[in-house]
Amino acid sequence: MSTARKPIIAANWKMNQNHLEAIQLTQKLTYAFERADFEKVEVVLCPPFTDIRSLQTLIDADKLDFKLGAQHCYFEESGAFTGEIAPSMLAKLSCSYVIVGHSERRELFGESDEWVNKKAKAILKAGMTPIVCVGETLEEREAGNTNQKIAAQTVAAFEGISKDAVGKCVIAYEPIWAIGTGRTATPEDANSAIGHIRATVAQFAGDGAAQAVRIQYGGSVKSGNASVLMEQPEIDGALVGGASLDADEFVRIVRYHS
Ligand code: PGA
């Protein structure tokens, strides 16, 4: 991890935790964390939509240091889009981040590169930060196409976005074969892929943006592998799925340096 970029560790609860469970889990985390933890690491909670209002209230009332994120949104501002949520609705709930292009959304819900780009723009326009997910399948990795795939996804996601704005975004490198499988990329492989993403950002947005953009690793991150991953110079944090549902485990991950 570079000292110039503050690490960002985000909990992606996926479709888990109703709003009552979410309040409980957040309270458990609150008791365990200390202010010093948030000085070292930015901690983001990304619950399901139905929990966001409850967590916003809790965070406001108790002046907690967690940032709030959503797992998804639509790119239009309003209109006849049954079931969708506009970025401005999330901004109004004090969300700072929105995950876009997660492989589950790409694979199960047909989210294309074009949509990822439209969403990233809409999220920025609403004053929030996209966490743009990119990653290769096992077949792509075995065929030696990892760099090509993640570079293409990165270029497509940021098309038409200003260099300044690119530098403020977050990217999550998540090899699809490592998500929820217990298989993690080796720290060296993750570092090399993330280095390639950073080099790609430098090509279209310049060195300033490439040095500023924070790039997380995601895919079976646990307390046992968090520190070796985060010690890598290119890795600026983690997007944590399964392990973020266990308060003690998530706290250990955020304290990877201690
Ligand atoms: P995992 O999920 O930590 O359960 O592998 C990561 C993610 O999908 O963001």
Image: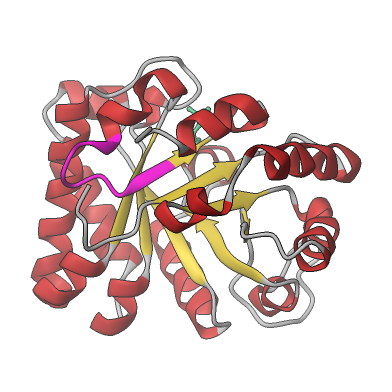
Image location of residue 247, percent across then percent down: 66, 30
Q: Which of 132 and 252 is in front in this view?
A: 252
Extreme-right residue of the structure: 20
Relative side of 31 to 225, left or right: right
Q: Residue at x 39, y 58 (%)?
A: 113
Q: Which residue lies furthest to the top in this view?
A: 182
Q: Is residue 220 above or below residue 5?
A: above
Residue at the image point whose x is 78% and y is 43% from the top: 27
Magenta region, residue range = 230-238
Where in the figure is residue 189, as x and y percent of width and height?
16, 29
Image quadrant where residue 250 sits: top right
The foreground one among 134 and 191 is 191
From what the image shows, is residue 178 above or below residue 82?
A: above
Q: Is residue 89 found left or right of 258 in the rendered image?
A: right
| Quadrant the C terminus occupies | top left
Q: Residue at x 83, y 53 (%)?
A: 50
Q: What residue is drawn where x is 37% and y is 23%?
A: 177
Query: Is 62 placed above or below 1 here?
Result: below
How many marks can you see? 0
Q: Which of 222 and 132 is in front in this view?
A: 222
Considering only vertical position in the picture, is 231 above or below 96? above
Q: Can residue 105 be seen in this view?
A: no
> Does residue 156 appear in the picture of this structure?
yes
Q: Is residue 35 left or right of residue 161?
A: right
- Magenta part mainly helix, strand or loop? loop
Lateral position of residue 37 relative to residue 92, left or right? left
Residue 211 locus on image (x, y percent) = 17, 66
Q: Name the colouring of the figure.
A: secondary structure
| Magenta run includes residue 6 | no
**Which quadrant holds residue 25?**
top right
Report which quarter residue 183 is drawn in: top left
Give the x, y percent position of residue 242: 58, 26
